[in-house]
Amino acid sequence: MGDSTSKTRTVAEGDVASGAVVKTGWAKVWDRIVHFKIGFMPIGLWLVLAVGYVLLAASNVMPKNDMLISLGVMVVFSYLLEEIGNNIPILKSLGGKVLVVTFLPSFLVFKHWIPAATVGTVSDFMKHNNFLMFFITLLVVGSIASMNRKTLLKATSRIIVVLLLCDVIGSLVGTGVGMALGLSAYKTYFFIVAPIMAGGVGEGAMPMAMGYAAIMSGATSGDIFGQILPAVMLGSLVAVVCAGAMRKLGEKKPELTGNGKLIDDDGDKLESLKARGGEVSIEKMLMAIVMAIAFYFLAVWLNYVLKTYVHFNLPSPIIVLIVLMAAKMLGYIPKDIAEGGAALNTFVVKGITPPLLFGVGVAQTDWNKLIEVFKSPASMFVILITVLSIVATAFISAKILGLYPVDTAIAVSCCSGQGGTGALAILAAGDRMELMPFAQVAVRLGGAMTVTVAIFIMGLVA
């Protein structure tokens, strides 16, 4: 007892002697409030922004086609929802912040609990400004530019093998489970399993529905699209949860993860921003942004040429990816731009991801379609098993091929997401935004393969 009192007195005397102020009671509570943050923002700054939004919404003064207003609304909601998701027990370990930021807004829109003017402002911005493409282009350029070129070549060749295995095994396992539950192989594969791996909505489900309609007599692409969309939506949700679980596994078993890398770097590995003391060269980052815009210019032009003269549609993101990978592998990207790419990648992940996820939830996630699949327990179970088989196949094959299993599983699981929006949510849940280039390979290449094979097989059995 005496020793304890002596120690307490010594600590207190030491604090006084050093001039430290020991805060107790209300002073301690106030200090916590003052230093509390919503995302990266001090609570005071966020409150100023929130009050501004409330004044606009209450006065019914919410102008459309105003980028600052739209971004401000997205920032107000997204970082608050992210903070809530980060503090929900259990859920926070399974990508909780992404689930809350993306899917809760969809539910709130469905219930009309977000003002209509706010929904209109955010939806107009997301639909008319191609904000998602802006994000993906910057992130892909930032990731690839800052990557070691030898590592890029090794990882890309191996992940394509993993992707092929996942497509085959995911199809077989998903269809087999559906048949075991009493569903026909035809319905299970063509309307549940294949749509999950089709690469999203615009580039996957829609062309798949059009292909099916051309083969099936009396069916319209609109009717078919409505049948396959719920599987795409729920598959993406399951993949988000799986990515959160993979991230947690990586934290518990560090030997299974590269923390954003698919394979160990070798050669002249670029130092991370953190290792360099967090220093960011604005000029170098601007150079990387300009390069991203230049590559996008080229991609849009090439897409036009291919569609007009070759009658072949190669999406602009894939063109950017191919051209940039080729330039990096051939050593044509200067070191200054590579360093700027690392800074750009950090900025995009921290500054743009949460607002974009909120925008996706409000404007591009239909709650009605998402819950439609819950009416059929058998279909829901097939979706769950299909996505789990893809993740498990990627994890196991990655170990065999010398890739990091956790990171590979997260990247490849993006093939079961809602295209670019799904990849964004999945990588954010796994805290692996650096893997966006490989996620795009999984989404675009994997989706194209699945759509082509599914339409071909339907043509044979119809």
Image: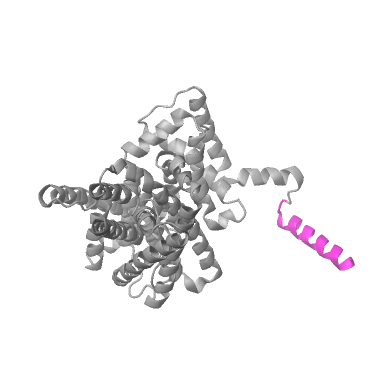
Residue 250 left/right relative to 398: right
Q: Which residue is situated farthest in the right direction here?
A: 2
Occupied quadrant, residue 405: bottom left
Q: Main secondary structure of the magenta part?
A: helix
The image quarter in which residue 320 lies: bottom left
The reply to whether residue 275 is visible in this rendering is: no
In front: 201, or 79? 201
Q: Examine the rendered structure and indicate whether residue 206 appears above or below residue 326.
A: above
Q: For the C terminus, which image quadrant?
A: bottom left
Towards the viewer: 333 or 369 = 369
Magenta span contains residue 206: no
Position of residue 311 relative to residue 257, above or below, is: above
Residue at left offset 79%, top offset 59% = 13
Where is residue 48 drawn, in percent x and y? 53, 34
Q: How is the image coloured?
A: one colour
Identify whether 34 is placed above or below 392.
Answer: above
**Which quadrant would residue 455 be assigned to in this image?**
bottom left
**Residue depicted at x 57% and y 51%:** 86
In the rendered image, residue 191, in percent from the top left (x then y), is placed at 36, 52
Residue 55 placement (x, y as % from top left): 51, 26
Count of numbered circles in the view: 0
Please indicate whether residue 306 sits to the left or right of residue 171 in the image: left
x and y percent of residue 257 in the render?
Answer: 46, 69
Name the residue: 37% across, 72% down: 265
Write down the region rendered in magenta.
1-21
